[in-house]
Amino acid sequence: MKKGIFLLLSMIAMFYACDYAGDIKDYKEDLAEGGPVNTILVSPSAFTLYVDSEFPSMSYVSVPTNTVDSVVVWSSDTPEVLDVDPETGELKWGTVRNCEVVISATSATRKDVKGECRITVRNTMGVYKYLDLRAELGLFVIDRNMGATMAFDKTVTNNMAAGLKGNYYHWGNNTPVANKEFGGDDGRGGYYTYPNGRTLLGGYPEFDPSWNAEGEHFSDWSQGGETPCPGGWRLPTKEECEKIIYMTNVANFNTQQEKTAARALREKLGVAMSGYQQIPGGNWQWQHGMLWTSTWNPETKKVWVLQATNSGDWKDDPWEMKEMELKGIAIAVRCVRDGNVEDVE
């Protein structure tokens, strides 16, 4: 009996020797080397994924570790929510909802041998927060720009703190561009790793003044292409921005109650003075707070922008829509989602 308990404890200890939080290590040394695969271990083996989380890099190890058939095929049991590239294991959002998803790595030669990662998908924010503005706009709105470490704070001098502004993006480019305040660096030195796993020394890459809609990596945000927004979120349309402009302009209302509501909506939206970067010249136009739309004119190469201009009276300055050149400009991004989604937590 004691011998059996000892063997059981030994097996448990060997199982927990695998580090599923990072690289898998400490495999059984008594397995024969070479030959067919008999076990596949996936890392991570389980985690919770929020819509604003970065995807982890999925990896696997075939046991024996030098098996001659270590190729796997990745698959998802719920690809309509969370899909995976069958060759690379790269994850990709579908239509997000609360559910459990199993990502499998199956041996290409032995279909009965596979490893699994169990993912708890949460259709809510883990990093960002959201504003429930359904009563005013019919929308949920993320409380800050993508990449910002904190939401709008009116007590911050000139509303220009880097933590309020967030990342800057060429329209149609999901990779953030250089922050000119830091001369093309992220201000911290060292390495910056993008969500796709690409790592660069010295922070963000330099601003690309040649970026345009004919580029290799261009994504048409106005056609539902991938954007910097979390899964299930999108850029506001021109019409939605026009509604924001109308509902926040105190001049459009007569009663004091209506004017107070318009000011309150402006404060809820908390448009940080993110400005935009413009090339040539590398100028940072700091005096504007921006909400970029997903509507653009492919003929003129211009995009519609909601612009909040601070001319001295931030409280009552009217906001406006304007067209801006697609080429040679980068700007902060705010995201929204429709107000009829029931499973926003």
Image: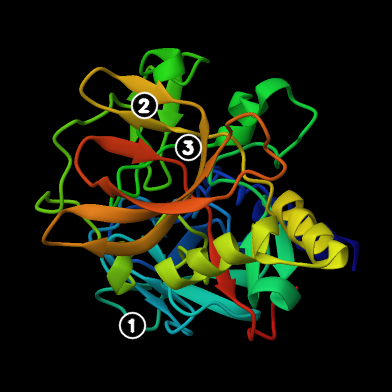
Q: Which mark is residue 23?
A: none
Residue identifier under label 1: 111
Disc 1 crowd rating (10 Å Cα; few below 14, some 14-19, many 20+) is few
Helix, strand or loop for disc 2? loop
Which kind of residue does numbered mark 2 sit on? Ala
Residue pictured at 43% horizontal, 28% vertical: 192
Instruction: Name which of mark 2 and mark 3 comes first in the sequence.
Output: 3
Q: Position of residue 81 (x, y in %)?
A: 49, 80
Q: CA distance from mark 2 to mark 3?
A: 8 Å
- On the rendered structure, is 124 left or right of 108? right
How far apart are labels 2 and 1 at the CA level?
A: 46 Å
Task: Decide which of 56, 192 is in the foreground and name it.
Answer: 192
Q: Look at the numbered disc 3 and give the secondary structure of its residue.
A: loop
Q: Which residue is mark 2?
A: 178
Quadrant of the rendered image containing residue 6? bottom right
What residue would you read off at disc 3? Answer: 167
